[in-house]
Image (tube, helix red, strand yellow):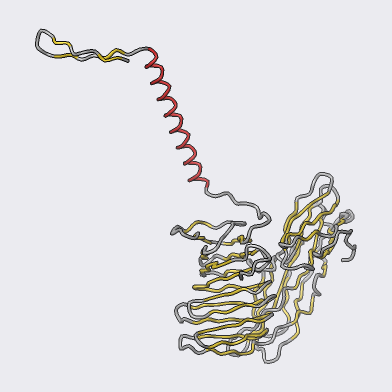
């Protein structure tokens, strides 16, 4: 491309012109096409990213914190961000991340060492620090700014509310509640021990006790009401279909009423039965084939509730025209981070589930009937109940334990 000197016409007007070579036209056309293609690709990728959102990821070994379960409306605000995003199952979390549940929301947070936090409705939880590996000296630490969280600690873990703080000891189960309107912190210990501090006051809350810190800075400890013991049906019983089921338990001294709940999950997110009764039994009928869980809580004169009984389970069977499937489960392989590999084999076409304390989780079965599953357990020795079912309703169950050896599991249970 070249530029010519101006040319003056008879009218006195100067005209400047430019000559353009074919090579210049070719290069200009190619440049425009490349730029347009890049712009279109960028717009396409941006649109897909905005519309699709983050894809749920599987719980990979080595993740320090994951959302094990999400129910209802749950939001997460990542550290150094002001945006609340939708939570999803197996979402990875980090230090200073916030979890918020709506009125219909619940969330379960699983840590690397097996510690679990279950966040109730209308709650906000901040993960202040986490143990990145099992050898680290750093404790897990959470801040509950409102609502309630059930704590199942494997190793010692710290907790805080805006008005109090403390430490849940190893192998401790309890509930932490903070009422921001009344500025009240309530700690209930079902198992283990919790240290609680508020200002210059410090108390030890043992199993079966409750500690309350009020806005007036009063800190007091009291004994919980007794815990009922489930009696019938026996735990892990198999019951025939089409019968009326009577759930029975042993009475607790000074209890006026009992709260009974029945569900298909040991977390009781969607109860089939919820009932408050004055006696020690309740009946229910019309249960379909499957596994069920139930528990009982004593209620006292001032409507104070004790700790619930541990979930008991039973299975309703159904008539089947052929034998239940064969099931062989090999002794699980346990890693130091709590990841357990479970392998076995069953009949081709059978369905396999594993219950490691959170209800039946489906397992993919290969065409030849072999299967491999990966689960996390709170501690070595935890029972894993593997069930195989065929299309006729037949079921075979084997129980193995997460221990450090590799041999064929016993056929007991």
Position of residue 146 in the picture relative to residue 363 (left or right): left
Give whichever of 98, 325 is nearer the camera.
98
Q: Residue furthest left?
A: 11
Q: Residue at x 29, y 14 (%)?
A: 2
Viewer-proximal residue among 29 and 84: 29
In the picture as drawn, the residue positioned furthest to the top comes out as 10
Give the residue at the far bottom of this rendering: 254
Q: Is residue 381 above or below residue 192?
A: above
Picture layout, residue 24 above or below residue 326? above
**Which residue is at a point 52% across and 48% down the rendered structure image?**
53
The quadrant of the rendering that contains the N terminus is top left
Q: Is residue 267 above or below residue 26?
A: below
370 left or right, relative to 157: right
**Pick the front one: 84 or 228:** 84
Q: Position of residue 39 (x, y in %)?
A: 43, 33
**Where's residue 142, x and y in %?**
56, 71
Q: Residue at x 46, y 81 (%)?
A: 183
In the rendered view, does 9 fall on the left or right side of 302? left
Callout count: 0
Q: Picture coordinates of residue 288 (x, y %)?
A: 74, 62
Q: Which residue is depicted at the point 46% across and 77% down?
A: 180
- Split into 4 quadrants, where in the image is the C terminus? bottom right
Q: Position of residue 169 (x, y in %)?
A: 66, 78
Tell me the quarter of the picture where residue 61 sits: bottom right
* Picture quadrant of residue 305: bottom right
Q: Say if 91 sits above or below 277 in the image.
A: above
């Amino acid at each position: 491309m070249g530029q010519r000197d101006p040319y003056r016409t008879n009218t006195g007007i100067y005209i400047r012109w430019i000559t353009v070579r074919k090579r210049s036209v070719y290069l200009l056309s190619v440049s425009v096409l490349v730029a347009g293609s890049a712009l279109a690709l960028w717009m396409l990728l941006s649109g897909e990213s905005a519309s699709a959102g983050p894809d749920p990821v599987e719980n990979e070994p080595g993740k320090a914190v994951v959302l094990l379960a999400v129910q209802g409306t749950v939001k997460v605000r990542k550290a150094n961000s002001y945006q609340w995003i939708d939570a999803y199952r197996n979402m990875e979390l980090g230090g200073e991340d916030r979890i918020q549940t709506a009125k219909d929301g619940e969330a379960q947070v699983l840590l690397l060492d097996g510690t679990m936090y279950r966040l109730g409705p209308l709650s906000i939880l901040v993960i202040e620090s986490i143990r990145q590996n099992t050898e680290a000296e750093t404790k897990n630490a959470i801040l509950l700014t409102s609502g309630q969280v059930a704590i199942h600690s494997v190793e010692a873990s710290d907790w805080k509310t805006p008005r109090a703080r403390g430490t849940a000891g190893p192998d401790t189960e309890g509930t932490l509640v903070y009422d921001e309107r009344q500025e009240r912190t309530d700690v209930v210990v079902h198992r283990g021990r919790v240290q609680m501090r508020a200002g210059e006051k410090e108390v030890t809350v043992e199993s079966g006790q409750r500690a309350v810190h009020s806005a007036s800075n009063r800190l007091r400890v009291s004994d919980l009401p007794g815990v009922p013991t489930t009696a019938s049906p026996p735990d892990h019983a198999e019951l025939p279909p089409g019968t009326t089921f009577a759930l029975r338990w042993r009475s607790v001294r000074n209890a006026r009423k009992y709260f009974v709940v029945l569900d298909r999950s040991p977390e009781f997110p969607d109860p089939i039965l919820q009932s408050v009764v004055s006696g020690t039994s309740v009946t229910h009928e019309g249960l379909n084939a499957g596994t069920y869980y139930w528990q009982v809580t004593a209620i006292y004169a001032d409507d104070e509730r004790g700790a619930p009984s541990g979930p008991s389970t039973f299975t309703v069977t159904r008539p089947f025209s052929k034998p239940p499937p064969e099931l062989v489960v090999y002794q699980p392989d346990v890693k130091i981070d709590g990841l357990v590999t479970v392998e076995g084999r069953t009949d081709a076409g059978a369905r396999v589930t594993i219950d490691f304390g959170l209800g039946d989780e489906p397992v993919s079965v290969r065409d030849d009937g072999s299967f491999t599953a990966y689960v996390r357990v709170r501690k070595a020795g935890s029972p894993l109940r593997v069930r195989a079912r065929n299309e006729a309703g037949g079921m075979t169950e084997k129980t193995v334990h997460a221990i450090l050896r590799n041999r064929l599991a016993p056929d007991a249970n």
